[in-house]
Amino acid sequence: MAIGLGHKSYIGFADESTWGTPVARTKFLELVTGGDGLAVKEEKILVQGVKDIGVRGDIEVQQGAVSVEGSLTFEVPYDGAEKFFKHAFGSVASSQPNAGTDPTVWQHIFTIVDALPTGMTIEVNRDVTAFIYEGCKVNAMECSVGGPTELLRIVADILGEDVTTASATSPTFTSVNRFSAPQAVLLWNAVQLNVQQFSIKLDNKLDADRRFIGTRLRSEPLRSGKIEITGSFVAEFDSTSQYTDFRNGTNRILKVTFTGPSIGVLTQKYTCLLECNVSQIMDYPVSVDDEGRITVEIQFRAFRDATNNELKLTLTNLTASPI
């Protein structure tokens, strides 16, 4: 019997037209080491009677609630993650910056909306068999770069309805590279900071316990609280500008821009832009640890105003609309 091998594993995504009804996967991404955490749990319902000292498995145990949940981790390629981002944010608007001279270049703007799309079917191929998770929603998404030599990484927390197994779909992967730390610039209040790492987390606040009698499966998760966008970045302590913003509760614009190689005919480049247009520093714990450089891990939260929601993502690449 052949043993399952991790190097043959991958993730597939597809839009569902009816929540919980699986569809064929059309977009594929590579898993990273330690990045497969999506699983199914099944509760057991045990009788509460006091008769006898044991529990009979044939008449005193029933199958209970099914919970599909967990995390998936992948590195963000120049092309290929758009469908996932649409389901994480809720909305995407695609256009061509220069349709006449650069007909292959597209710009995709992902924004937060009140209601998320219907749902996704997610396939996780684990070599021996593929696991097909239906009715999947992105409960949370963290975008991060862990250091100056790392890639832009996504950790997605998923809620789903149910899972089956099937033969793996034959995948087609993107042939382009991934966004990396050397391509990134972080601006706070339009000033570039010397940053070692950063993280931005979108929490969609979905209700994982929306359950009713008559079924073992959860109903479609809906938002149960206010959306939260939080994050942090580790910067050198070279002025009191951010400390003053912290003490004054000042709203600032946070931007993180990744600029990749050129594409198209003109001067277009692969880009990934994360924008929090109404951000406040929530904690500024500056202290001296040793005789070297002083750094501070700045914690922030993003809010919305009359024009902008908490977080916006803009991708410029070769992925044609519709997504």
Image: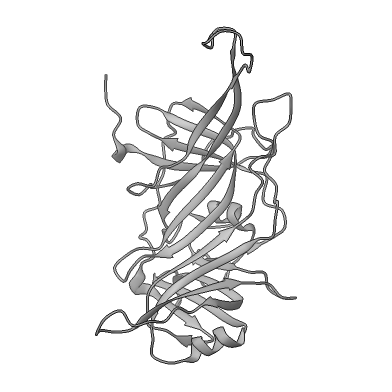
Residue closer to the observer: 302 or 243: 243
- Reply above or below: 202 against 4: below
In the rendered image, the vertical position of residue 167 relative to residue 180, given as above or below: above
Q: Which residue is drawn at 57% across and 34% down?
A: 67
Residue 216 percent across, percent down from the top left: 65, 26
In this rendering, position of residue 52 left or right of residue 155: right
Query: What is the x, y in percent for residue 26?
Result: 51, 42
Q: Is residue 3 above or below residue 209?
A: above
Picture coordinates of residue 187 (x, y %)?
A: 48, 82
Q: In which quarter of the image is the N terminus?
A: top left
Residue in the foreground of this view, choosing between 17 and 223: 223
In the displayed structure, 259 sits above or below 22; it is below
Q: In which quarter of the image is residue 79?
A: bottom left
Residue at (61%, 34%) from the top-left corner?
161
Residue drawn at x 32%, y 64% is 150
Residue 145 spot, x, y in % from top left: 39, 66
Number of numbered discs visible in the structure rendering: 0
Residue 301 seen in render: yes
